[in-house]
Image (cartoon, rainbow, N blue to C red):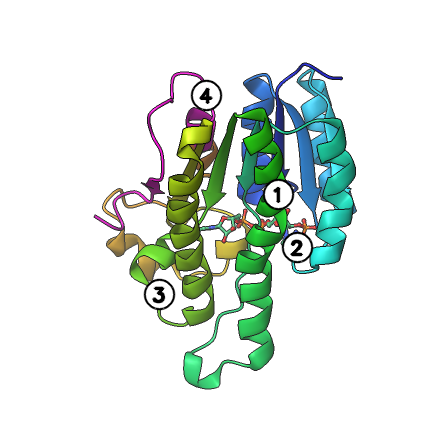
Amino acid sequence: MNNNRLALVIGGSRGIGKAIVLRLAQAGFDLCVTYQSNHQAAQEVKTAVEALGRSCNLLSFDLADRASVRAALTPLLEKQCPDVLVYNAGIAKDNLLAFMKDEEWDAVLHTNLDGFFNVTKPVIFEMIRMKRGRIVVISSISGQIGQAGQVNYSASKAGLIGAVKALAREVGRKNILVNVVAPGVIETEMTEALPKDLILPLIPLHRFGSSEEVAAVVNFLCSEPCMYIHGQVIGVNGGMAI
Ligand code: NAP
């Protein structure tokens, strides 16, 4: 039995998830990091966590495949219930709704929203048993205010906000805090191709955010002093939604 605090980060191999993993490792958590298929990126994260003196266990599965998720998580949960779950993984397949392919709708909803259920159900069961836990779900400003060309993505991210609010009402009395972090436009592979000159005027801070800025908020929500923030949506968006 390992007594170190454990954080399970879903989609922690790249971008915002990687920054969250490193921030939590700096805060003293051992890590279990999941990803889909980019083994090299995942190995790099593991090496970086170990260089910080923490352990890092890697798991790969497709979030949309319920059986694979459960098969991968069961041995972990039998060994140790994570103190923290960060549900970060997400994909976008943008198109105007009139032209959206069935596969674009299905892939985004199955990964972003069904994936949350596939992961969180077995984890919450163990957290309730332990009577402790922190859950942070990464949504998006698109789920708060909607974004043209992202009806599928916005629906999945708004769905996560509804799910967290309902879950927060279910498990607050079990000493499990559940919150959402909703990033605006963050410098990552996902936003590389965006037209900066058109978007910057919409952001009062007039710059894109960094993954580290999102990770700092996630870390705060998982920290000891943060005991009374529950069922909330924390925007990290430079004022893009006020
Ligand atoms: P990213 O760089 O594309 O990384 C996504 C992570 O999720 C990777 O670890 C990836 O694994 C994993 N993943 C993707 N699909 C998966 C699947 N089907 N099964 C299992 N794992 C899967 O993403 P990001 O840009 O850092 O964004 C992270 C989160 O923030 C997402 O939920 C995104 O919607 C949200 N967000 C991002 C922005 C932004 O500006 N970037 C803004 C608002 C919200 P592999 O490495 O194996 O592919």
Label 3 neighbour load within 10 Å: few <14, some 14-19, many 20+: some
Give the residues drawn in magenta, as a range. Answer: 218-242
Mark seen at residue 10: 1
Circle 4 — which element? loop
Q: Is residue 236 magenta?
A: yes
Q: Are marks 2 and 1 in contact (CB under 8 Å)?
A: yes
Q: Are marks 4 and 3 in contact (CB under 8 Å)?
A: no
Is residue 77 in view?
Answer: yes
The number of numbered badges drawn on the structure is: 4
- Quadrant of image for the N terminus: top right
The amino acid sitting under disc 2 is: Leu
Q: Are marks 1 and 3 in contact (CB under 8 Å)?
A: no
Q: CA distance from mark 1 to mark 3?
A: 24 Å
Residue of label 2: 63
Disc on the earlier residue, 2 or 3: 2
Which quadrant holds residue 235? top left
The answer to whether the beta carbon of the residue marked 2 is less than 8 Å from any atom of ligand 1 is yes
Mark seen at residue 223: 4
Residue under the point 37% across and 57% down: 143
Residue of label 3: 147
Disc on the earlier residue, 4 or 2: 2
Q: Is residue 214 magenta?
A: no
